[in-house]
Amino acid sequence: MARASFLVVFFLVALCNSRAQALITDEEQARQWLDQYNSLAEHYYSLAEEANWAYETNINPQNQQAQVQASLNRDKFKKEAYDNSTQFDVNSFTNETVKRLFNKMKNIGNAGLSDQTKLNRLTRLLADMKQVYSTGKVPDGDRELVFEPDLTNELANSRDYDRLQFIWKGWRDAVGPTLRDMYKEYVTLKNEAIGELGYNDVGDYWRSWYETPTFEDDLEALWQEVRPMYLELHAYVRRRLGEFYGKDKIDENDPIPAHLLGNMWSQQWNNIYDLVEPFSGKQRIDVTSAMVNKGWDALRMFNESEQFFTSLGLIPMTPDFWRDSMIVRPEGREVVCYASAWDFYNRRDFRIKMCTEVTQDDLQTVHHEMGHIEYFLQYKDQPVPFRDGANPGFHEAVGDCLALSVSTPKHLKEIGLIDGVLQEDDEADINYLMKQALEKIAFLPFAYMMDQWRWKVFDGRITPDNMNQEWWKLRQQYQGIVPPVKRDENDFDPGCKFHIPADVPYIRYFVSFIVQFQFYEAMCDASGHTGPLYKCDFYRSPEAGQLLGDMLKLGSSRPWPEAMEAITGRRAMSAAPLVRYFEPLTTWLRQNNTDSGTKTGWTRFEPWTSSAPKMTGSAMATALICVLCCLFSRLMI
Ligand code: X8Z
Ligand code: ZN
């Protein structure tokens, strides 16, 4: 604490000295100021992260209070630093890096809120929303189901229509209504904070991180490019689900009921691979049971992941990482289970927090999180404002890119999760690509619509009294899904997805799922891979590792197209590698849908109602006759 007050005084004195003067043009003075800023930023950021870690790994009122206080201290520092940075005449500077550092300093987020009472309230609200989400439970007889692992597992594994519906609705009842009013207040306060920074609204601020004037148009173009693949996949899955659950439950022209896709938000569908497998009787490509049978545990999964990173010559996890990370759900205390990776901004301390289960899904997530840590490690010596992804999508893409290599049957065999001789024929390939598509292609419209919804909430196109209805309109429009039970405005279904109450923007994942295939293709080329892209495993390729590592080291010191160029040789985001990867499956799906007379797309529905059985033809005819009779009898009178 003594150190903290000393630093505050030191910092303020240094800055106040310059306050009375005209704008400072001396670049050397600016550099010194930045150095000083950097060590203070490390100090306040790491204290805030420590307190946040303590809270999220042990939710209780004392830890929440300490977390809120540390966050407010950091915000106070950020605001003062930003205010004082305006003493410099940044436009007169010649050094691009110095200029960029000063510009990054404007990104102070909630700290922009000058009314302290409101900032306190917003900070508390954020902690409370996370708590509501993380401690939500679904009563089930004499049990209480927690989200991870109970609800996640049931959604993934149950094939009972009614049980799935119970779980799906139960989770939404458990947290949605409580979060609804909190979220409205959050939107108002957060917009006010961001407004003070000169942005139109929070969405405008979040999008600014991509430094791309045409960002929204670029995203729409990418979506239009991949949408035809999604429509083929959607139509195929809908038909197979109809065959399994019955045509009365899933009509061939309708959106799919949201609870049948193996995931609480229907965001990734790989858990229902068994229901939609193209060719039966082939080698198993779902390795969850192999992991369990071979006695894998969370530590083994983390070790395997690190081994993959180091095989590329990338940086291993640190001793502190292994000592301080939380990799399984602890007993006897509430925690935020949602997986996350943490940079404590002291160049030493990096951790993962995850309630790992022994499943293939979680093995993917372990790689995902370790990808974040690898980025942290690579850019740790950059100044604090540059300790970030080239853009947020890049950060999300690193671990997933490596996992594309890990998930190849070739690699799974290498690490002992597939036994016997590898089956390599066209049917086995289509099965594999289907599994990948259920994870990667199914995700794209979800990742796109999440922030379409939020941007509209923040800029007022969606008003507080129609948040849920508009959510379901977008869910139907992009994903072609409908709720299995009636929804109304007392529900708050967006709040039942972690990133919404947790204040984490989501478009980063859409970007990630596009660019990870660009990174993957570049690394495959560097490793000397030839043949179909989806067969590439760049395990033990120092060339692939070097290419990635060089890009990660840049952090956010350069605009992202330069980072993209460093790894792929091209500056733009492109869906071409993803389209190439899935090409054999896309062709197969088109053919299969045509041959089976399966139509793509869906007819409109009242999305805020439900997918409950519809009026049959005869009921419709009876209703029509009644109306006509009624009209006729009126005319007669
Ligand atoms: O939230 C995550 C990571 C943490 S950054 C586990 N992901 C998104 C999600 O689960 O919704 C990874 C993929 C998409
Ligand atoms: Zn992530």
Image (spheres, rainbow, N blue to C red):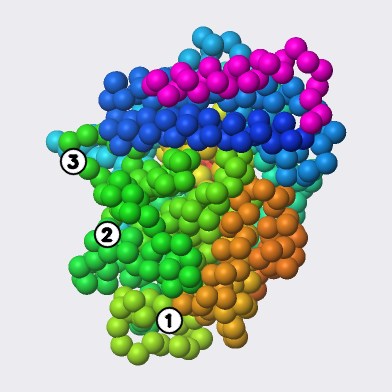
Q: Secondary structure at mark 1?
A: helix
**Residue 278 in picture, x, y percent from top left:** 46, 75
Q: Secondary structure at mark 3?
A: loop
Please tell me which residue lies in front, 330 or 477.
330
* Residue that sits furthest to the right in the current view: 92
Residue 422: say if magenta: no
Q: How far apart, in angstroms, are the residues tagged by discs 3 and 2?
A: 17 Å
Q: Which mark is residue 299?
A: 2
Q: Disc 1 designates what residue? A: 410
> Relative to 62, does residue 101 appear above or below in the rendering?
below
> Relative to 49, does residue 612 appear above or below in the rendering?
below
Q: Secondary structure at mark 2?
A: helix
Report the quarter where the N terminus lies: top left
Residue in the picture at 46% in, 46% down: 347
Q: Cβ–Cβ below 8 Å for labels 1 and 3?
A: no
**Residue 172 in picture, x, y percent from top left:** 39, 35
Q: Nearer the viewer, mark 3 or mark 2?
A: 2
Magenta span dominant secondary structure: helix
**Residue 460 in picture, x, y percent from top left:** 67, 24
The crowding category of the residue bearing disc 1, from other C-alpha atoms within 10 Å (few below 14, some 14 to 19, many at least 20), is: some
